[in-house]
Amino acid sequence: MTAPITAGTPTGSIYDIGYRGYEGPRLGRAHAIRSLFGHSLRTAYGIGRGGRAKIAPFVLGALAILPAVAIVGVLTLAVRFGAGERIAEQSPIRYETYFSTISTIVALFCAAQAPELFGRDQRHGILSLYFARALRRSDYALARIGGFAAALLLLELVPQLVLFLGRSLLSPDILGAVRNDLPSIPPILIQGILSAGLLGGLAMAISAFTPRRAYATAGIIALFVIPGIVAGVIAGLGSSDIGNWLFLTSPSSVLDGTNAALFGAQLSSEFFFINLPDVAYFATAIAGIVGSVAITIRRFNRFTA
Amino acid sequence: MALISIRSLTKRYPGGVTALDGLTVDIERGIVGLVGSNGAGKSTLLKILLGLIDPTSGEATVFDMDVRTRGTDIRQFVGYLPEHDCLPPDASATDFVSHLALMSGLPRAAARERTAEVLRHVGLYEERYRAIGGYSTGMKQRVKLAQALVHDPRLLLLDEPTNGLDPAGRDEMLELIHRTGTEFGIATIVASHLLGEIERVCDFLVAIEGGQLLRAAPLGSFTEQTGTLAVEVEEGSEALAARLTAQGLEAIADGRAVLIALTDDRPYDIVRDTIVDLGLALVRIEQRRHKLEDLFRDMPIPPGAGATATGAGATATAGASVAEEGPR
């Protein structure tokens, strides 16, 4: 033990200016929640942790932004040859397709990073230190989920921003291009919030139930993948509506539905045969968000710290 | 009003285990030892005071605030050192402690400043920038104490703070706790099953067993002299006891010792003369003191529910006497 060298020896007392109390402000619960939100957002990207913790989130972040950067690059070239507008219109990478283009990356980000937040706190017994402080258990859960959802929102919206800037700045008529793209912004924001809320909420709800990272990751992937497969098989087997409606158990199908409704476009080709009312997608997405948050709060309220 | 006021507090866990059973006691400022064997309800009591778990019935207030409804307000001013491991191996002590300071409501700059100060106070210097995973048990225990102190609490709740430490580490931890409690004047409750340690740092004792109050009183009253004289001889304690009884003393043989009831100085001379007469080898003569251990060794098995309730009422009065002598 190295401690005795430093503690209680005469050398220590030279620096010992005595204990001072703290008379400054105590900002209480709201400040604690804000701080935990920020901490969760940073931790989701491995910031404030060792270098290895940053690999997965940053690689996934780079992959998510890559299509946007690539298309902007192509546009830059095309503009030189005077084909800018045609490429911009016909590119497969547009606002309305971007969410489904990077949906796998977002799902992987969830599976890799959500267990970092809740799993670590449970694994090392840190929860009892949080619960012994100026926040409630529900505050803890909400701040963590909120921070993670914000991380997902960044993952999804930064590429859209790159796309928007590229399209606008490379256009000969910048103002006109901005005006042209403005109507796309509300759908982008709404879809981003729904997607980050649903995928983030579900991923966090699963990782709240196990301290084991591997279990949480497997559970998240299973929840994101299996319902779609099951629904696909059942829809393929029978002609009944049941298979159609079962797609609402698949988060990615639900988000595909809201995306199509928001942008007034077609469902992506693999789901061409699904024909459900738009409201069903939105209701399911919102129910999924509210439900997963409620389950997570309940979990921590019952947790014996 | 007492710092902590507990009224017929009961906690039953879903499995049917009763951790606290009608506990009533007032606790005042000072360093208070909460003693009891494993499973006596110490940890449960601390967690209820923190608002970490809800009591099944009864009342408890900390700083005059109800633990059920004012949990977040109470916890702003309470530091808690849990019994179990609670540190992430991959964070540095500085990062972790200042993060928890934010969670207690301190502004960011203050959190950083207090962290540096408090880590220095517990004796962590250069190593505070390294990951906690590489720390010794003693250093980890210091980090746990630092996180409990970082927001300058009015009340410290320490659950088995010397858990897992070697003798040197124990001494240092106890010294730290003693300094924290006396020099800084932070009210402290130390829960422990190690009576020897409690004896060294605490002014008051609250002894619980089976979720009920055994006794609450200043430490001194637990160890005051008894009216028993112990005479230890090499052999022949039976004969000595018989001779002493014949001379009108209340004496019983207890192994190599003879225990004699002491009401005045008279027995000392009789014992001396009797030992000389019998030609015994005397080892020692001493007046017995109460030991803290006696508290638990002599504990009567609770006879019935009704009698227990009366017992709890009687000891609660002892608790009130702590309240009277307590404030400093």
Image (spheres, rainbow, N blue to C red):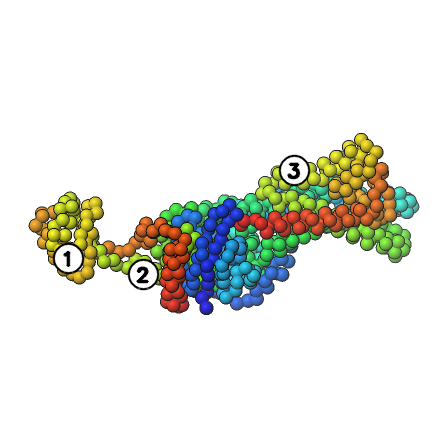
Task: For label 1, count other residues whose C-alpha is less than 10 Å away and answer few (under 14), some (14-19) or many (20+).
Answer: some
Q: Are marks 3 and 2 in contact (CB under 8 Å)?
A: no
Inspect the image, locate mark 1, and give the three-letter code of the amino acid beneath it: Pro
Q: Nearer the viewer, mark 3 or mark 1?
A: 1
What residue appears at the point 75 percent right and 40 percent down from the top-left corner?
A: A250
Q: Nearer the viewer, mark 3 or mark 2?
A: 2
Q: Are marks 3 and 1 in contact (CB under 8 Å)?
A: no
Same chain check for tags 3 and 2: no
Q: Which residue is mark 3?
A: A218
Instruction: Tell me which chain the residue with mark 2 is part of.
Output: B
Distance of label 3 from label 2 (alpha carbons): 60 Å
Across and down, in percent, residue B44 comes to: 48, 52
Across and down, in percent, residue A300 comes to: 60, 50
Q: Secondary structure at mark 3?
A: helix
Inspect the image, locate mark 3, and give the three-letter code of the amino acid beneath it: Ala
Across and down, in percent, residue A175 comes to: 88, 57
Q: In this rendered view, identify the residue nearer to me: A298 or B115.
A: A298
Relative to B131, say whether B199 is above or below: below
Task: For label 2, count other residues whose C-alpha is less than 10 Å away and answer few (under 14), some (14-19) or many (20+).
Answer: few
Instruction: Tell me which chain the residue with mark 1 is part of.
Output: B
Q: Secondary structure at mark 2?
A: helix
Can you say which quadrant of the picture contains the C terminus of chain B?
bottom left
Distance of label 1 from label 2 (alpha carbons): 25 Å
Sequence-wise, which precedes: disc 1 or disc 2?
2
- Mark number displayed over residue B118: none
Relative to A118, say whether B185 is above or below: below
Q: Which residue is mark 1?
A: B267
State the image quarter where residue B260 is shown: bottom left
Q: Which residue is mark 2?
A: B221
Task: For label 3, count other residues whose C-alpha is less than 10 Å away and answer few (under 14), some (14-19) or many (20+).
Answer: some
Inspect the image, locate mark 2, and give the three-letter code of the amino acid beneath it: Ser
